Image (cartoon, rainbow, N blue to C red):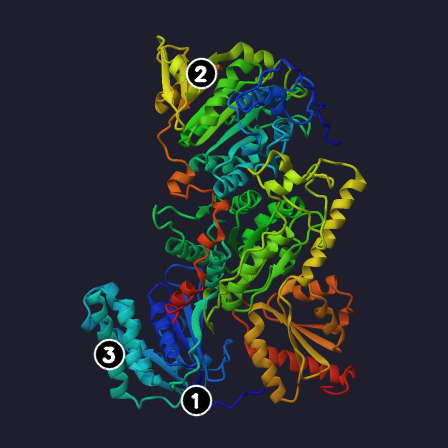
Amino acid sequence: MQQRSRNGINDFAIKLANVNGTGSASANGLLMQAIFRMGVPVSGKNLFPSNIQGLPTWYEIRVSKDGYGARSLDYDLMVAMNAQTYARDIQEVRRGGYVLYDSSWPLDRALWRDDAQFLPIPLAEMCNSRFRNPRERTLLKNIAYAGALVAFLDIDMAVIETLLDEKFAGKKALRESNRQALHIGYDYAREHFSCPLPFHVQTMDANRDKILIDGNTAAALGCVYAGATVAAWYPITPSTSVMDAFREFCERYRREPETGRHNYLVLQAEDELAAIGMVVGACWAGARAFTATSGPGISLMNELLGLAYYSEIPAVIIDVQRVGPSTGMPTRTQQGDLLECAYASHGDTKHILLFPANPGECFEFAVKAFDLAERFQTPVIILSDLDIGMNDWVVPRLHWDDSYRPDHGRILSKEDLDRLPKFYRYSDEDENHVTPRTLPGVSPKGAYVARGSGHNKLGAYTETPDEYQQVMDRLARKHRSAADAVPLPQIEDTARSRIGIITLGGCDPAVREALDLLADGGITADYLRIRGFPFHKSVEEFLYAHDVCFVIEQNRDAQLRALLVLETCVPKDRLRSVLAYGGFPLSARHVVESVSQHVQELTIAGKMKGRSG
Amino acid sequence: MPSIAKPVVRHPSQQTNELGLTIRDYEGTMSTLCAGCGHDSITAAIVRALWEIAMPPHMLGKMSGIGCSSKTPAYFANGAHGFNSAHGRMPAIATGAAAANRDITYIGVSGDGDSLSIGLGHMCHAIRRNVRMVYVIENNGVYGLTKGQFSASADVGSKSKRGESNQFQPIDPVILALGLGATFVARGFSGDKEHLVPILRAAFAHRGLALVDVISPCVTFNDHSGSTKSYLYTRKNELKATAADFVPVREEIVTSIAEEGVTSIAMHDGNIVRFRSVPEGYDPTDRQRVMSFLLDKKNSSEIVTGLLFIDETVDNLHEQNNTSAVPLCQLPYEQLCPGARALDQLQDEFR
């Protein structure tokens, strides 16, 4: 495959193999944050198990001066801290790469590789002689290897020291033991090896207007800024940190200064059935409310998503997708809930979906979701995923426009109601096929019974075919008209190619990198990233404008492709799938290899004359 | 079947409450339940209680799930918003609504299928959270709309219409609620409106969740001999533990003359509930003794009714959360959004 040449300065990848629950995450995060502070584009991917302690866990750091943030599969350095996985980890290093390992214990000669260089450091031995407390020894061993990496990668020691100062402000003893551990590794590396390694970090200025944030935190922040006051949830990986963050932000920003009272309420529900029930109840009463969950939770919420759809009650659901089906792999990423969310619940139902590609869009789309939910009086599901939600991403600083005001849609005030001869809940549709709603506590004139049972346009119970269909047909029109209101697809068609590449969500960085690599190899393609459902008309236009479109997504069953086939008129055979669904974030290599192979096959079969138009 | 509006007939002599509303103003559309259904009597008691406490109709939220009982919110308080939701989910939806707007008085109307089977977990957790609401279970021991299956409240040995005998232990919502730490537990009988109305009035004044289990015979599927939820069986086996008398705060002054054997409890909102304990020494504030009394009577197949337990000292959901006094759904947006400057400052931490 094509591989861009790397000179090693600010262009390399390392992988750290650890044992879960030993405190490695904070050491790894520290390294990534230091590189970020040095102004260098960096990304970190935590590949962790569904476990509290003992199972293998990995962390990958990719440094890319060009800003490629997708997972790299070419590791220049492996930090092998887990003897259980030595065999596999050592094999993963690229030819000519390096392996740092803990030489307190001898390394099995069978694992040795002649085409890699080994960096033995007796980390445990040194930490054991320096520190007394067993827990401290385990934790600080991580800081010790971080110290070695500071030397090997030429990370600015002053930056690391500042980060430790910030982290352990007011905890003097901890700060001191961390400093010692850092220098144990650093000094050993400098004394025994030639530092830095050929690939290393050099200060840049690429991060001035950037932040380091995970998608769950960003989504929670969006909910705060949107004015959400009620949040209900049931704990589930990988969405839990959405609510943790929401609660933290609320404690900070939503206490009445004089009284200390809370301008929010977070309900930890008994299950996801209740969580969505609480959201629907709160939205019915007029609050902005949301829940955060993952695939298994969406399965349970199907019932009340149908109720909210049919009784036309807004609701915002953040689905941080993980690997299914069933329990699946809770700590691995996938885009497997597309079809389920699009048509969640029995009967004819259709929902509005938003597909953020990074934490920046998680923030933006969270706000948008509330506006859409209220304007269209229907559930809106944000489909994030574990990779976006739980990994720290470098993104442009978030912006907020203070002139923003929530779009509550059509809600009748007491004065509006006073002017009406009589109020009927499902009559008087506007250009979006939305009818005005009323809230409890405003006026007896606005009273009606919201119901999931058959109802007519007056809001009354019905079992009459025409009356039932009239409402159902309007709901279909209403959903269609949301196509112009959801975030537009991102289109880059300057290549004017016959090949289109379509993707969504967290595939974006890998696909963008792949586009560059494919172009280097002579295959140019246009790009479209879907950001909302129902699909805007430009999606169908793009499909028709290309002889072949590769639909790149992270699930087995080509769910985005299926949705495109169902919801557009484009012939099925124009759409070819590139799928990755093993649970780790997508890499450009996978996309390049698949697309190249397809293109080759198509060219041989005579279905495509040239590579680009 | 479409809903049927009731014709408005105003009798000039009809009494009005302090809002100037007659009892007819608290009615809803025509019931579509079977003639003689216990639920309709409960609806009538709710109408009466709402009129007596002069509830502004639009300040009431009528919540329900699915089942015969859950249809009834359409049959009272036309001027109130209602939510006829999904089977068993009413407590969750009511919790969310209560979270959003604490100024609304919520009444949830449920049944034994809705609350003791499919929605049992939700009911238990609404009780735990002490959501401020009146929670009525119209308990008939049977699934009516699906034609006569036993429900989870059917007693062991109770006979179905087809003659089958129930084998499984019943779930008694009153005993369950007491075990869960409920702060207001009552049981009524749909055939005794005079007894039920003051219980409902007290329930509306309660600080947290007021659970009112009402034995409500199903005339079509569970009113035969062999049933333990029939009119006849309930009348024969009813034991009134308390006769409650609800005294609104404005009348308290004239009725405060203590009577012998009467206990007064000040409700959180200042109203008073007075009890006359029928079995001597019955104390509706002693959870443990109430529990053992009920278990004892259960063994002798007696159906204990009345305001059985009350505790006005426990915080409700909003009090526990220290929520703003202004309903969350009415807070101005300016108070909710931290603004651009705060976002800028916050992001200095994300570096």
Q: How busy is the neighbourhood of tag 3: few (under 14 within 10 Å), some, or many (20 plus)?
A: many
Circles 1 and 2 on the same chain: no
Decide: is B128 above or below A127: above
The alpha-carbon separation of the residues under discs 1 and 2 comes to 84 Å
The quarter of the image holding the C terminus of chain A is: bottom right
Q: Are marks 2 and 3 in contact (CB under 8 Å)?
A: no
Mark 2: amino acid = Ala
Residue A205 lies, in percent from the top left, at 41, 83
- Identify the subunit bearing mark 2: B
Answer with left or right where residue B2 lies relative to residue A279.
Answer: right
Nearest the viewer among A601 and A243 is A243
The alpha-carbon separation of the residues under discs 2 and 3 comes to 76 Å
Q: Give the numbered dot on residue A183.
A: 3
Q: Measuring 33% from the left and 88% from the top, which residue is drawn there?
A: A196
Answer with left or right where residue A113 lies relative to residue A504.
Answer: left
Q: Measuring 47% from the left and 63% from the top, which residue is drawn there?
A: A218
Secondary structure at numbered mark 1: loop
Answer with left or right where residue A57 lies relative to residue A321.
Answer: left
